[in-house]
Amino acid sequence: MYKVVRRDEIAPNVHIIEIEVPGIAEKARPGQFVLIMPDETGERVPFTISDWNVEKGTITIFFLEVGISTAKMARIKSGGALYSVSGPLGKPTRIDNFGSVVCGGGCYGIGAVYPVARAMKKAGNTVTTIIEARSAYLVYLEEQLKEVSDKVLVGTADGSRGSKGMVPDILTKLLQNGETFDRSYFVGCTFMMMNCSNITRPYNIKTLVALNPIMVDGTGMCGCCRVTVGGETRFACVDGPEFDGHRVDWEEIFKRKSIYVKNEAMAYQFYDQAKGLDCIAN
């Protein structure tokens, strides 16, 4: 069992959880993830590591409550425990002094983009960070991102904070206004990452995206997280999770991610009605 130092809902349906795992905290790098089982019968779910503290021996992740496993995690109180935490997994982000870097994050990706922006800034890059949300009340981590970025731009679908629009809209305006970038990095929903990759392609901006396909094993043995990049099969867990956004087969990813959508929705509804969630909180 792994102690939960902190678990709070920082925005509607968005949670932060800090976990005591000294071995993982010591080895964690930007872009890597962990696999978490909330309880002994739970599934193994991947979460990007958003921060880590070697002295405290903790890691921090952000997650959305979207299914049974994340619902269980959302009901764990500070001081509680998780059954299993494995990692760090995946290849770290390549950090170097590229010059000018733009980072984009949406939803859970706002937390996931933080360690990359921080590392890019520390390496000497000029960092522009763009974050998106449906409305102002769903924006989080803005002040922390300002501390590790030269510029932070916020987009909301309803225009209640920052610019009206999402990461692709803001990115398009920046490029049309003559801003140039030597590197771009995006993490969040698949649609946003695909659109941003299509936007940077004509400008020949090297673009990395953190893919989030269905994952089970996390060590390259089950093959569930396979994606096609440059016409070749890759496993997101061991070859990624970051890939060249200009070479990803986006249509395949959308199809594979939608396979169990109805099953997941039905399972979540059944579990909630059975009051299984209430048991976790006690």
Image (cartoon, rainbow, N blue to C red):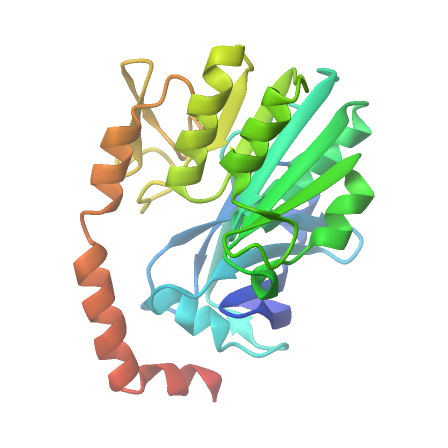
Q: Is residue 201 visible?
A: yes
- Number of labels in the image equals 0
In this rendering, position of residue 268 left or right of residue 136: left
Above or below residue 139? Residue 97 is above
Q: Looking at this view, is 85 or 9 the one in front?
A: 9
Residue 23, percent across and down?
64, 48
In this rendering, position of residue 27 left or right of residue 109: right
Residue 237, percent across and down?
40, 35
Above or below residue 171? Residue 43 is below
Residue 97 picture quarter: top right
Residue drawn at x 52%, y 45% is 165
Residue drawn at x 28%, y 34% is 253
Residue 274, percent across and down?
25, 86
In this rendering, position of residue 15 left or right of residue 278: right
Residue 13, percent across and down?
49, 68
Residue drawn at x 42%, y 23% is 198
Q: Looking at this view, is 71 or 166 the one in front?
A: 166
Q: Is residue 49 visible?
A: no
Q: Looking at this view, is 272 or 41 the one in front?
A: 272
Above or below residue 140? Residue 13 is below
Residue drawn at x 51%, y 25% is 208
